[in-house]
Image: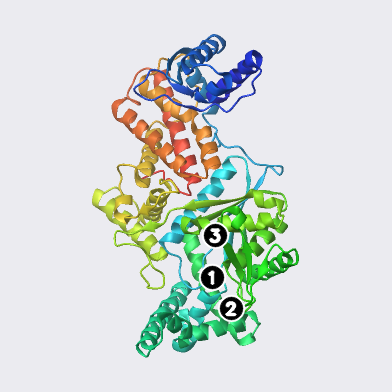
Amino acid sequence: MNINTILKSKLSEYLKLKYDVDFNDFEIQLTRKDFEGDLTIVVFPLVKILRQSPANLGNELGSFILNNSKYVTGFNVIQGFLNLSISPFYYLNFLNNCLSDVNYGFINPDKNSPLYLVEYSSPNTNKPLHLGHVRNILLGYSMSKILQASGKRVNKTQIINDRGIHICKSIVAWLKFGENKSPDDLNEKGDFFVGKYYVLFDKVYKEEIKELISSGFTKIEAEQTSPIFTEAKELLRKWEAGDKKVIDVWKLMNGWVYNGFNKTYKDLGVNFDSLYYESDTYLIGKDIIAHGLDKQIFFKKDDGSVWIDLSDEGLDEKLLLRSDGTSVYMTQDLGTAYKRYKDNPEMKGLIYTVGNEQDYHFNVLFKVLKKLGFEWSNHLSHLSYGMVDLPSGKMKSREGTVVDADELILEMISNASKLSSDLGKLDDLSSNDKNILNHTIGLGALKYYILKVDPKKRILFDPNDSIDFNGNTGPFIQYTHARIQSLLKKETYKNHSVNNNLEINTKEKQILKLLTQYPEIIKSSADNLNPALIANYTYELVKTFNSYYQTTTILKIENNELKLFRLSLSYKVGLIIKSSMELLGIQVPDKM
């Protein structure tokens, strides 16, 4: 049993027996390096409950656990922190018990486990995936794996925004300027091909606005009466009316885009369990809005548009349907949420991975669903994340200044290839093996660079900083895993039990302490929807192991029991590196 679980159980029993208090929410962390001890229990949450000083309470709990656990050898109290010293016997026993368990730290879900839906990617079919999408996709995919490791059943899902005025802009531009050409004609990816016409629309639109303003129109009048924008609005109206010609062109161009998306997803190593399309769910949303009008939850304005008043929630009025009957994003999101619940009535969580510029939108969405009386709306949450900036500034899709995801992937692989070549690390590999390894290193660098940052924080992404075999990077962690495999191969290591009564040094104990924390890190990462906790735990483990590796003799020692222990410790560290990186969607090679 994990030491954290043991300590929590014993302390909870004590509090129940002495104080008749039910408490098991102990925060246990590794003791800071400048204090004596191995594990620290935060006492402050109990101070108000038991009305004792932190020092007295810490000493009381410390004395109890010292006398009632064979694993605790001493304690000290500093303010509200109880620092415990744990015997090496526990750590060695722990290593023996979990040595060959490749799923250590995981709770395997079964058919009765709670079901969580995780939405990510959810692109528009008018442009290719870009760097902003990459952060979204990597966050959502990683959280899916982490939630599953914490014992949840997971459905990886996306809503494809395949209709609306933005889609019509691309279609209008292609119909006017595309000369009936296809991506195959130009040997281009379908999403890139369609995205060019979205950018072209914006260019023509701005030119028309400029001309209209020079002829006496106001800016607002020019924006609304621009010929190309008028065509796009008319195309949307025809689409919603089911015009066959418009629908056929829409299907053709969306098909090109889907082929492009699928290639990018494959290159990123991600997938989905279910797909939803706005072209389907917006109709459900319209039905929900009609229901809300009947129940007088929503109201119509004089122009026929439909709204909800959320002033009692500290918000304002929110548009749900335009005056001409066409949908807005909220229409579709209401329908999609309802459809997902109908498809998965047992769901205990639906997590939307969407950038923080949509915080207000999701606040409104959740409140609208609650007003409609849907109890399952309590299971909805928003994994809000910061935007990704480039050294050159913010990306803008309409102006064509985004970093295309495919170009980014190629650049990362190229950077990995150049660095590996400069360092001479892959000289003995075949050309094919080099390509595979450079793809693994390049994608690992990209994914780790993005996922090591708390989702709430904004990222300044510089591809060159992410490719490094030193520091807090994916390649550094991958290289450490490869180093461990090389070490084990030299000794043809096979895992065996180690002597529980060995004397171990400070660094060995520190590594073992980190290994014992892995299950807690997975749980905390799942609870907080934060893959960065996994990433930074892995870096700390790798950094500690590398320091140990550089200062400790592992193979060339005569004491076979100690050599076996050190090899076993290295083997377990390798397993945890591989396991934790897989939770981030990152592969680790055996050779670099």
359 and 259: which one is in front? 359
Q: CA distance from mark 1 to mark 3?
A: 26 Å
Q: Earlier in the sequence, mark 1 or mark 2?
A: 2
Which secondary structure lies at badge 3? helix
Which secondary structure lies at badge 2? helix
Name the residue furthest left. 422
Name the residue furthest top. 67
Say which mark, if any, is on residue 361: 3
Give the crowd class for mark 3: few <14, some 14-19, many >=20 residues within 10 Å.
some
Q: Quadrant of residue 2?
A: top right
Find residue 353 and report its horizontal and vertical position in percent.
53, 54
Cβ–Cβ under 8 Å for marks 1 and 3: no
Say which mark, if any, is on residue 251: 2
User: Residue at label 1?
Assistant: 258
168 sits to left or right of 205: right
Q: Amino acid under label 2?
A: Lys
509 and 348: which one is in front? 348
Q: CA distance from mark 1 to mark 2?
A: 10 Å
